Image: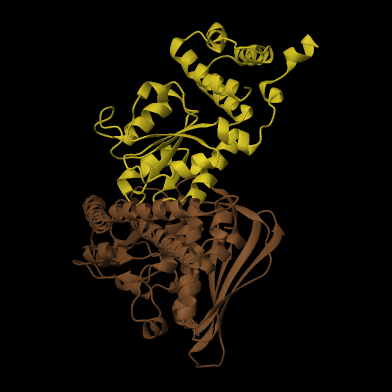
Amino acid sequence: MLDILRSTCPFPTISPEGDLKDGQNIAQPKKCLKCAAKSCRSLFKAVNDDGLRHAVCEHSYSVMRLPTRHGPMLINGVFVPFQNTVMDAPARKANRSQKVTWEQARGYAALMGAAEQRIQAEIGQQVKDAVAGLHDIKTAVSVVFRNAEAIIYSLPGFDDADKIDHADPSLKALLKSVNLLNSRLNLVSIVANPESASYGQPRPTRVYRLFHLMARLFEAEAVRRNVRITMAGQSHSSAMLHDSFETIPLVLLDNAVKYATAGSEIVVRVNDTNRPAQPCTAVVESIGPAIPPEHRAAVFERGFRAPQAKAAVSSGSGLGLYIAKIVADANNCKLQYSARVFRSGAEGGANCFTVMVGTL
Amino acid sequence: MFGLLKRRSLASLEKPLSLRELRKQTKIVVIDDDENAFPVKALQEEGYTIEYWPEVRSLDRLEQGDFDIIVLDIAGVAKKFSPEDDGFGVLQHLKANNPSQIIVAFSGQSFDLSKQQFFRLADDTMPKPVNPLKCKQVLDHLIESRMTVKHLWETVVAVLRTAEVPEKKIKQLEKQIASAISSGGKPDLKAVVSSVVEKGDLAAKVAAVVMKIASLFV
């Protein structure tokens, strides 16, 4: 979004990463292009409010900081007479050719804010339309749930868990499929409304048990792909987590099963850390196409799919890890990716995703 | 002996109940136009006291605190009472009337950005579709954490402090309630509350929570 806004801006801009972009009407000032100090960027960190801010950089150029809903941007090389009167005559002359007044910048900020709101509303409506049918699907899944439960409750057993344990394998498989379908529907809800990842109260959650349950849901798919899921480690601790946390094992195991080399083993290791603030760490390691170093920073970005992943499996939205990151943040967890490439230049490697529960 | 009793706080009188007893004692109502949405029968068989309403049958019963936990859908349940906001209108109304009322947002519309307030204002959420294990997890957590004398009394104190009732009066009320409950029988707790809290609306709000506290001693 910020890129779109910058590309429509009539004035030159700088991104938080230091990327300089010409404006529609005015190009980047030469001084800014040559400037190594880029002290103007300190404005990104120094100021943290919703207002339009003005500053003068060490080359006596005016800089406007424009907040947007998607992060701030800087309009640079702006000449504002009352701020820049200390400049010498040639400098003033050079700057006048790039003249943008405070009022113009403010006018643009207002226009941009309105445009941003309209774009956001449009995106919101598009998402709403796209997921409108989701409610009906969920209602239909409820019916399947109730019917499956009716069968389970007619079975002998001490309680529901006992009844499920002793149920027919085909009924167990049906239950697993419905639970998996339900978890996948929750993924879609989080894409449409990331806020929903933190809905409800955090509850004591056994992380090992959750990964174990999810591993069981993926058993059939793992067998179909000729990979094995092994649970390892030892954890007895509970962490206070939102229901959305189940999305993390879902995404990590889904990806691992999808991309693991046939005949390989996916290892899920959950260990206690003996630290109250960080009860446990879960690691999902699988052998498959490793993500190249130049792409690793983008692993959790929306829509990202590494070239190796695209080559291995053509379908995919690139949303899974993006959602997992949203959920990790909502649950005060840290999600990391690391890779071990077996040989230099070889495509194979071990992909390792680590969830540190209760840390941020 | 009498002096000791007089100094006792309400929380100290509490006799911890087992989860099984708490499940039985906690009155739950599920309000949802889809009768398949919540596993009412399965949970009744597990010992929960659950009533099912396809729509809000009586706002008065909900206001009076007849139910300890209200599991509330957002759509198609309260057109008569809140034509615009439906379930959300009921949630807002009940929370304003009795902040200690436990309400669980039960909806499959967590994806809808315009429904955020419904999920945020509720005490907990249960996204649809839901299975009995998840229901038990949510309900048990609420029962164990909220259905305690300590938690309910803290709610009363918060309400009274917001209304700027002096601390002395709050302590006096706690003593009188503790004394009424310890005396056994069926004490008129509404009268006890009214004798200390003068404002009618505030007294009604406090009395609703106090009645819940008393139910934990039955």
Quadrant of the image occupied by residue A92: bottom left
Q: In this view, does B92 lie to the left or right of B203?
A: left
Relative depth, front residue between A348 and A167: A167
Label total for image: 0
Q: In this view, does B13 lie to the left or right of A136?
A: right
* Residue at the far left in the pictured view: A25
Tell me: residue A240, above or below residue B155.
below
Tell me: residue A234, above or below residue A237.
below
Q: In this view, does A26 lie to the left or right of B5?
A: left
What's the image's color scheme?
by chain
Residue B201: image location, x then y, percent: 44, 14
Q: In this view, does B28 lie to the left or right of A112?
A: right
Relative depth, front residue between A227 and A58: A227
Whether residue A54 is visible: no
- Point 39% across, 53% down: residue: A147
- Work out which quarter of the rendered image holds the N terminus of chain B and state it: top right
Relative depth, front residue between A236 and B37: B37
Residue B154: image location, x then y, percent: 59, 26
The chain whose colour is brown is A
Whether residue A294 is visible: yes
- Point 62% across, 14% down: residue: B177
* Residue at the far right in the pictured view: B1
- Work out which quarter of the rendered image holds the C terminus of chain B and state it: top right
Relative depth, front residue between A95 and A206: A206
Quadrant of the image occupied by residue B32: top left
Residue A84: image location, x then y, percent: 33, 56
Q: Colour of chain B?
A: yellow
- Point 49% across, 46% down: residue: B135
Residue B174: image location, x then y, percent: 63, 16
